[in-house]
Image (cartoon, rainbow, N blue to C red):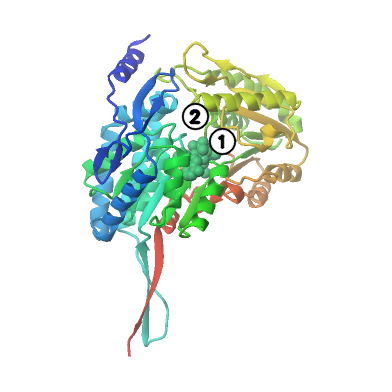
Amino acid sequence: MNESNRSWHERAAQLKIDGRALIGGKRVDAIDGAHFDCISPVDGRKLADVARCAEKDIDAAVASARGAFEDRRWAGTAPAARKRILIRFAELLLENRDELALTETLDMGKPIAASRATDVNAAANTLRWYGEAIDKVYDEIAPTAENSLALITREPVGVVGAIVPWNYPMLMAAWKIAPALATGNSVVLKPSEKSPLTALRLGELALAAGLPEGVLNVVPGYGHEAGQALALHNDVDCIAFTGSTRVGKQIMQYSGQTNLKRAWTELGGKSPLIVCADVAYLDRAVDAAIGSIFYNQGESCNAPSRLLIERPIKDMFLERALARVADYAPGDPLEARTTMGALVDDVQLQTVMRYIDAGVSEGARLLVGGDRARVDSGGFYVQPTIFDEVRNDMSIAREEIFGPVLSVLAFDDVAEAVRTANATPYGLQASIWTRDISKAHKVARALRAGTVHVNQYDEDDITVPFGGYKQSGNGRDKSLHALDKYTELKTTWIRLD
Ligand code: NAD
């Protein structure tokens, strides 16, 4: 074990974790005292007891958020004051970078280098960006007749319930809470039961930054208990959900069954990456195809899990791709050089292994991987896996696997590639690689996805909206467009004569 490796393991052994909920500015146990074991996917050991919040705890958290909203302790502050607190909140994330990164890695299994350099930075940047933006957003005056004035203003929706997944726990939480808080709402955040720890720390850091008590509440717990109670709650005005399409559909139903709260969903994907024979940057395309599916162990909603290659270059492309797979050998997530860590838990491991078995039995050709890795570690690791000769009707091409599994499909002309790319219930992201500018534009228009990349895959910035077409969800996270989710538009008519 080298020195930096030892120090992350040593720090892990000394890490103090508080698994209690945060309600009304106080760390509290679940009202009935229930808790669940938080297990590390790195080695299978228990990290903490975490409060198992359920209906009564959700009632308390929503009441706290409602009280904070009604007395205007946050909604009534000037945008410039909210800006200062959100920027301080962002700074505190960076000041606590090592602890947050370590907690994220232990809780979720991703490599420490990624947690440290990407997740903490991106979450802090999100908070800072919305803080900086909010005192620069103006309302409108409508072009009405001279004897009246019509003001079009934005108001916070009120109490926002945010339900987030386990794959980027801190960042997905930041994508919700930053625009919701910037616009003056109160929030009840429900992290995934599989990775609840950094969300709890975010709640504490928000208080330390000066956010008034009760404005941000964090309630860990299971989806069918805490999540469902929050999404069904009649005093929640808006539910902002990121997770699977299956649960996203339930979220919309809960809204319809109760108070028609605004329901925003960021859901799954089965994103295509199309490489044409006239690709200009072949090695860049190989890097993007391999790097983007294996980053974060393949547990990314926008991972390009379907690689569509024009037949004449397929073998050459795959030869180069296979040469890159060794760069993603699963390793100890606490080792600084590791590029692929552990899957989040045993359930996810079994799901991924089932899809690999299905790929083999449905007749796809296993090119590399296909097995567990680091089986003696106590954690949950899978080899980077590539299937060739996949047809779009196979389950490994149709369904979101959410693991390091790439399905390769050949195509003969670009129209066929577009048909195959769009033949999915999902529409989150897509990519086209070609040197022909008009082909690139035509295909980009034809692809039914919230984000289309040309000659790249994972360029990303907080300034651009992110979200899906079709069953990948509705609404957008990131950019100023996200403010639409957390504000009501009000028209005020004033008679002047
Ligand atoms: P999931 O749907 O199982 O769970 C997401 C959250 O919903 C968790 O907090 C969970 O506890 C909660 N939940 C589960 N059942 C619930 C219920 N009945 N009522 C209310 N809440 C409930 O998803 P997951 O496995 O945590 O995350 C992986 C999924 O998230 C993938 O499908 C991935 O594509 C998607 N995702 C999408 C985006 C995006 O921006 N589009 C980003 C990240 C992840």
Which residue does the numbered mark 2 point to in the structure image?
296
- Helix, strand or loop at mark 2: helix
- Helix, strand or loop at mark 1: loop
| Amino acid on which disc 2 is placed | Asn
- Residue 228 image position (x, y, % from top left): 46, 45
Q: Quadrant of residue 104?
A: top left
The structure residue drawn at horizontal position 36% and vertical position 55%, both measured from the top left corner, is 159
Q: Are marks 1 and 2 in contact (CB under 8 Å)?
A: yes
The structure residue drawn at horizontal position 37% and vertical position 88%, both measured from the top left corner, is 147
- Distance from mark 1 CB to nearest ligand 1 atom below 8 Å: no
With 75 as the anchor, is 325 left or right in this view?
A: right
Within-10-Å neighbours for mark 1: few <14, some 14–19, many 20+? many
Where 82 sits versus 290, above or below? below
Within-10-Å neighbours for mark 2: few <14, some 14–19, many 20+? many
The structure residue drawn at horizontal position 43% and vertical position 34%, both measured from the top left corner, is 193
Tell me, for residue 471, which label it has, or none.
Answer: none
Total count of labels? 2
| Nearer to me, 33 or 240 | 33
Measured in 3D between alpha carbons, the distance from the residue under mark 1 to the one under mark 2, in whole angstroms, is 9 Å
Q: Of callouts 1 and 2, which one flags the residue occurring earlier in the amino acid sequence?
A: 2
With 223 as the anchor, is 13 left or right in this view?
A: left
| Amino acid on which disc 1 is placed | Ala
Q: Quadrant of residue 298?
A: top right
- Residue 194 image position (x, y, % from top left): 44, 31
Where 245 sits versus 51, above or below? below
Tell me, for residue 303, which label it has, or none.
Answer: 1
| Nearer to me, 157 or 232 | 232
